[in-house]
Amino acid sequence: MKKHIKRYFYVLLFIFILFGIVYISFTQIVLNNKIKEEIKNIQKFLTKEKKNNLKSEVKNIKYVFRFIKDSIYSITNEELLKLINVVIAHKIDKLYFNDIFVYGRLKKKLKYEIKDNFVFTTLNNTKYLVALGNKGKKIYIFGIKKEFLDNLLIYTFLKYLEHYNKGKISYVALGKITTFHPKKDGVFGYIYYMPDKFKFLEGKLLSINEPDIKGNFYRKKYFECLKENKGCFVSYFFKNPKTDIIEKKISYFDLIKDSNFSIVKGIYESQIAKDLRTKINSKILEVKRLVYTFFALFVIIYTLFLFFMFLFINKAKNILLNDFSLLENELINRVYFDKLTSLPNRNKLLEDIKDAKSLVILDIEDFSEINDIYGFEAGDKILINAAKILKNLYKKVYRIGSDEFAIIFDEKINKDILENIVNLKIVYSDLLAKFIAGGSNCKKRLLESSELALKEAYRNNKDYILYDDSILKIQKAKVEKLKLLKEALDKKQIIPYYHCIVDKNKKVIKYEALMRVKIDDNVIVSPSFFMELIKEAKLYIPFSKIMMKKIFDDIKYLDKKVSINLSFEDIADREMREFILSLITKENAKKIIFEILESESIKDYKLVKKFMTIAKNKGVKVAIDDFGSGYSNFVQVLNLNPDIIKIDATLIKNIKEAKNYKLVSLIKEFAKTFNIKTTAEFVENEEIFSILKKLDIDEFQGYYFCKPQPFEKIIKKDKIPFKKGNNENRD
């Protein structure tokens, strides 16, 4: 038996050794082939990586140039806005010029252009970045030469490049493109900047006809790329400053279009080869080490495998059980607890609320403004501090939304409890926040009723509200009103009313279309009845679409222009935006004026400007409504390129007050300067009309002249031919 055991042992040992030799030989062959393949892949990858790095660095340099330019222009513009106030304050009534600045009073109309929110003008054949201001009818200017700013930009940029190139073999150089249509000599620019070792090359002309030392016309290739305003890689032969040997170089060329600078950064083939050798040697050494290590481990592991198997399985079992327990706890925390405040979340509230007698929902007042102004870090600190305050005072506290908390009570609550909660102060650094609360004792619908109470607190501008039957009545009334509005929407009972706009002779020259809705027994209601509710219920766009279609149907039969109100919601909704533009035709465009409210509701002036530009290109006029309401941004308004400004009603109603009279006068002067017509709304009597005429207001609107009327009465009054059935989609 012992002989057999020994024989088996030797046989096993021989098989083990033979297997090791065969395995190592096979592995060596496979690895040698793999190394060859890996060398090719490394070479491709390294070349691609180096090229991507070149491209990335050139793009970053372009970004730095743009950043420097934006910084110089922004800072300069801010200072000009301060200096113009000095000019106005000192009443500098002449126009002064020096080597850099122009300042003083303008006595003739100024032609200007607005680019990137900066105002530019040309005076005495010199372009300036300017700030404008007025005092009464006087217009003042303070400007700085654009050439000076551009020189400062180039000086700063070159200083940056000097620092960037210091001590580097792979450097950044600049060329100046003087023409994109070279003559016979092929010259299209010159070398503008080189690092210290190659300063002697600065000023050298660049020609598409000049080859490198190997005869390659590489400049022609990158010139074509620059001409198309795109970057490209070009290979050519150049002297390596480190070795003084002429060798192949790969460079990435791109164009800074603002200043017609070509920007280039390259890498020599020897640098790529050096990195390649390093990587390959490292890879071979790594493979050899891996083979020897693996063989040694193979022997040891095979010997100890059976012995440690039992221990490993037993340990693995314990680890798995432990990991499962940790995972279970983690899942419970994720499902039931808030990560930031460690409070139970909405899911936990929904479980615990079954046994609750009362509930309070809390909201941090103006929390979104805290995030917007002070940042999310400050917002998180406020939330953490709020959670600590509530946990110290109450047993069952939950975080159920971004800035929403809930407190469960085991007894009925009263207004005193709510008042105590809203009087709590949440402090972080210099920030002070407070709660708005809604509470309920309605056990069957605690969460819903508490949230309704919180909404009513916000709606009524109160610190807290305790839910009662009156809130339920309000909610039911709201539901009933919404039901009526949905029925009106289904029946398309959205009706345009038309309010006349007159000239100085009280002659009707156009109409403004106003939305009305016919509900329950032919009752006609105005926007104050439905506008807030249809926006809240996300029905505004369907209402607006029907209104828009009916207005455009009516325009066919009107011989006067019609002003159509557009909200930011109309323009922000892509489908609605395209629908409105589709209604404009060559025949009706001259009759249309799009009227947009100039207020905080405009969240994206670029989108509004783009829409208005498309509409104006189709022939439509643009009006700004409620101008002067307290938010008017003159630069933003000018960017919209309006044809008409409608002056805010509060100014017109109180025109007899000196400050309002002055404001309207200034608005008129502003509009006149930029060739914009003015319309006064809410003209209620002859006295106001007379004052406005003296101020040279162009157009007038108000109940003094007429009241809004439906289409049928307008065409009857104007004696416009119209047969019943011609406008089949009216109701």
Image (tube, rainbow, N blue to C red):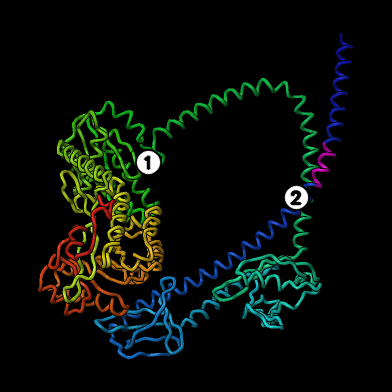
Quarter of the picture holding the N terminus:
top right
Q: Secondary structure at mark 1?
A: loop
| Majority secondary structure of magenta residues | helix
Q: Residue at x 78, y 42 (%)?
A: 289
Residue at which label 1 appears = 341
| Residue at 31% in and 28% down | 352
Tell me the element at label 2.
Answer: helix
Q: Residue at x 58, y 67 (%)?
A: 61
CA separation in Å, label 2 and label 1 = 50 Å
Residue 706 located left or right of residue 7: left
Is residue 22 at all visible to an observer of this figure? yes
List x then y, in percent, for residue 133: 31, 79
Q: Amino acid at mark 2?
A: Asn
State which quadrant residue 699 falls in: bottom left
**Percent coordinates x, y for residue 305 in the rendering:** 73, 24
For marks 2 and 1 on the same chain, the one whose residue lies earlier in the sequence: 2
Point out the stretch of residues depicted in magenta.
27-36
On the question of residue 374 being in view, the answer is no
Decide which of 721, 644 is in the foreground and name it.
Answer: 721
Does 74 lie within the magenta span? Answer: no
Residue name at image x 21 percent, y 45 percent: 457
Q: Amino acid at mark 1?
A: Thr
Residue 533: horizontal and vertical position, in percent?
A: 24, 47
Q: Position of residue 599 (x, y in %)?
A: 29, 62
Residue 558 lies in quadrant: bottom left
Q: Is residue 709 above or below residue 334?
A: below
Reply above or below: 491 against 514.
above
419 or 127: nearer the viewer: 127
Q: Are marks 2 and 1 in contact (CB under 8 Å)?
A: no
Q: Does the magenta run of residues contain 30?
A: yes
| Numbered label attached to residue 41 | 2
